[in-house]
Amino acid sequence: MSISSSHPQGVALLLLIGFLILLEIALRFLFGFGNPLLYLADPKIGYLLAPNQKVRRFGNRIEINEFSMRSGPILAKRPDATLRILMIGDSIVNGGWWTDQPNTLSEMLATRLRASKSAPLEVLNASANSWAPRNELAYLKQFGLFDSQAVVLVINTDDLFATAPTPLPVGTDRNYPDRKPPLALVEAISRFLPPPPLSPALQAVYAEGGDRVGANLEAIRQIHTLVKQTKAQFLLVMTPLLREIGQPGSRDYELKARQRLLEFTQSEQIAYLDFLPLFNAASQPENLYQDHIHLNVAGNTLVSEKISQAVLDFKF
C-alpha cells in the first residue's frame, strides 16, 4: 500500500521538477532572465554599469565595454585620423533592454555619419539608466573625454529636476543588481512582487531641497567647460516626455525650467537642440515612444537624423 500510494506523488514530483527545469531554460534563453546587467556603486558617479558585459534581454543584444559604455571595445586614446564622438546620457541614450545594440542612438548616429564621412568614425555611448547631468559630469571627470572631437549630451525634461548622484540603489533596488540571481525563476518572480520600501537614507536623497534645476544647469555648464578645454565641439540635446506633446503640453514648472534652460544655453553659447517642437510636428508622436519617456526605433531614427545634421555642421 505504501509503495502504490506514494507512486503518484513521485510522478507528480518528477513532473513538477521537469516543468521547473524547462521553465528555467525558457526564461534564460528566450527572455534573458537570470543574466541581468550588473551595476557598480561609485561614490561620485552614483553608479555605472559594470564593465565587460554581454547579455541578451528579451532578444535584444546589450554590450558594455571596459569603460562601462554601451559600446564595443575601444582604445582610451583616439586612433589617428579617426573622428570620435562621445554621446553621454541616461536610459534614452543607453536604450535599455528594449533596444537592440544596433538600434541605440549612438549606433544609429554612427551609421548616418559614416554615410557622409569617409574617415574612420566612432560614436561612444557613456550612459546608464536614470543618470542626470550631475552623474554625467562625475563620469567625465573620472574617465575623461576619450580624446573625442565632439560631445553630445542628451537629457530629457525630468533630468532638470534630478537629485544628486547616490550609490544607494545598487544591490538594493532590483533595477540595479550587483550580482546575478541564483535562478532565472527568482528574477522573473521578483518582477511581479512589490518593490521593498525605500530606505530612510534613499528617501532623504530623493527629497533633496534647494534649486535642483540650478544644480543640474551648473553641471551642464561644467561639462561644457570640460569640452571647451579640449577644444572639442559640444551639443546639448533635449527630448520631451510624451505627455508634453500636444495639449495641454508641459506643466507650468516644466515650462519655467525649459525657459531657464533656453536662456542658459543662450548665455553660455551652447549649441542646443530641443526636440519638443519637432515631436509636436509629427503626425503621430506616440509612435516615437516605447513608453511615456523612452524612445523606440522610430524615435531613435528621428533623433539620430537631427543630431547627425547638427554634428555635420561642426568644424572639426
Image (cartoon, rainbow, N blue to C red):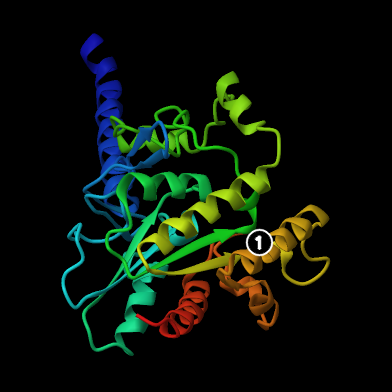
Depth check, front residue: 63 or 206: 206
The answer, for residue 98, to whether it is visible in the render is no
Q: Position of residue 235 (x, y in %)?
A: 49, 69
Residue marked by disc 1: 264
In the displayed structure, 208 sits above or below 130; it is above
Depth check, front residue: 131 or 198: 131
Q: Position of residue 272 (x, y in %)?
A: 58, 71
Query: Residue placed at 45% from the left, 27% from the top?
Result: 172
Q: Secondary structure at mark 1?
A: helix
In the displayed structure, 292 sits above or below 107; it is above
Q: Position of residue 16 (x, y in %)?
A: 31, 32
* Mark 1: amino acid: Phe
Query: Residue placed at 62% from the left, 33% from the top?
Result: 206
- Please identify the quarter of the rendering in which residue 25 is found: top left
- Please identify the quarter of the rendering in which residue 118 is found: bottom left
| Farthest residue, direction top | 2
Q: How many marks?
A: 1
In the displayed structure, 81 sits above or below 232; it is below
Query: Residue placed at 77% from the left, 60% from the top?
Result: 255
Depth check, front residue: 193 or 41: 41
Circle 1 packing at 10 Å, graded few (<14), some (14-19), many (20+), is some
Query: Residue placed at 45% from the left, 50% from the top?
Result: 136
From the viewer's perspective, tell me whether residue 280 is left or right of residue 225. Answer: right
Depth check, front residue: 214 or 63: 214
Q: Position of residue 251 (x, y in %)?
A: 80, 57
- Please identify the quarter of the rendering in which residue 227 is found: bottom left
Dividing the image into 4 quarters, which one contains the C terminus?
bottom left
The answer, for residue 283, to whether it is visible in the render is yes
Dividing the image into 4 quarters, which one contains the N terminus?
top left
